[in-house]
Amino acid sequence: MNKQLRTWILAGVMMCFATPSPAQEISTAKDLTAVIALQGLPCGQVTTTTKQGDNDYLATCQDGNRYRVFINAEGRVVVQKQ
């Protein structure tokens, strides 16, 4: 998949995030799991999410890794290991 298409897909997933209800929290965890996997980072499955701001999440994975997933000023999805 070309890099620009992958960026648009990731941005679309991130823009779907809103203030999560309990049902949306499960969806958010699944979406973040997909975003992290698309970046090729180890995670397995996101078990806990913490919303830090608009389109800015802290994801904790079942393997213990933690990632900050957010959209930067250029509109690109960024995944940073914490």
Image (tube, helix red, strand yellow):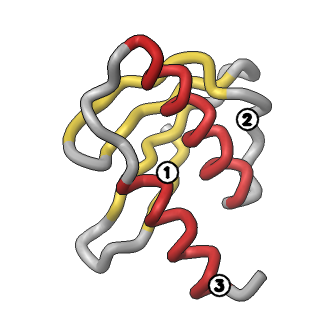
Q: Residue furthest front?
A: 23
Which residue is denoted by mark 1 in the rendering?
80
Q: Residue at x 65, y 25 (%)?
A: 61
Q: On residue 3, which mark appears?
A: 3
Taking the image as shown, residue 30 lies to the left or right of residue 51, namely: right
55 shown above or below 43: below
| Alpha-carbon span between mark 2 and mark 3 | 21 Å
Q: Crowding at label 1, few (<14), some or many (≥20) Cα neighbours within 10 Å?
A: few
Q: Residue at x 39, y 49 (%)?
A: 16
Q: Which of pointers 2 and 1 lies earlier in the amino acid sequence? A: 2
Mark 3: amino acid: Lys
In this rendering, the count of numbered labels is: 3
- Is label 2 or label 1 in front? 2
Mark 2: amino acid: Cys
For numbered disc 1, what is the local secondary structure?
strand
Q: Crowding at label 3, few (<14), some or many (≥20) Cα neighbours within 10 Å?
A: few
The answer to which image quadrant residue 68 occupies is top left
Q: On residue 43, which mark appears?
A: 2
Q: On residue 71, which mark appears?
A: none
